[in-house]
Image (cartoon, helix red, strand yellow):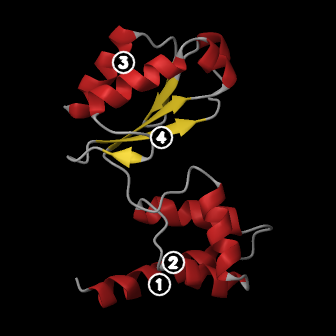
Amino acid sequence: MTMQAASTEIASRTAAIIDEMKGLEGPLLPILHSIQEEFGHVPKDALPVIADGLNLSRAEVHGVVTFYHDFRARPAGRHVLKLCQAEACQSMGSDAVAAKVKQLLGIDFHETTRDGSVTLEPVYCLGLCACSPSAMLDGEVIGRLDDEKIEEIVAEVRS
């Protein structure tokens, strides 16, 4: 598919999502979530379509997309591993957990492994403070992380 065709396809699918959801009260966030669900990220080519469809400036749409950590500019890996970085998890060793995961995967936060197997993201509270440090792998929460669990997680996402 040419870049022009890809851009046209993104605009068309984005417009359909906007038409379906623009009647909601405060439709921007639900639209962005739907677009990310559709494409795996929020494509740059979708931003002007959203702005036009909701009568917003491109800067307003861009500001919302970049403000919220859950919106991605590029597709995620096959697995998404989110490590809690909130205060309770920090006090229980999340910095060491993050350092170990980064070392094992060879990536930093907001990066995807070269083989596309995993994207590593920080998250600021999973509601598992009593079981910290914690993580979320593909939507499933994991508490009481230690070296053994970290190695199991990395082996799972790499297989």
Q: Which mark is residue 121?
A: 4
Image quarter for residue 100?
top left
Q: Which badge, 2 or 1, is on the more N-terminal residue?
A: 1
Callout 1, which amino acid?
Ala
Tell me the residue at 45%/64% (across/down): 38
Tell me the residue at 80%/68% (across/down): 25
Q: Is residue 22 above or below residue 137?
A: below
Q: Residues within 10 Å of mark 4 (few under 14, many from 20)?
A: many
Residue 65 in picture, x, y percent from top left: 61, 63
Q: Nearer the viewer, mark 4 or mark 2?
A: 4
Image quarter for residue 67?
bottom right
Query: Where is mark 2, residue-wise?
Result: 46
Residue 89 in picture, x, y percent from top left: 61, 19
Q: Which badge, 1 or 4, is on the more N-terminal residue?
A: 1
Q: Which one is nearer the viewer's eye here, 37 or 90?
A: 90
Query: Where is mark 3, residue-wise?
Result: 150
Tell me the distance, in whole angstroms, between the alpha carbons under discs 4 and 2.
Answer: 23 Å
Residue 124 in picture, x, y percent from top left: 63, 34
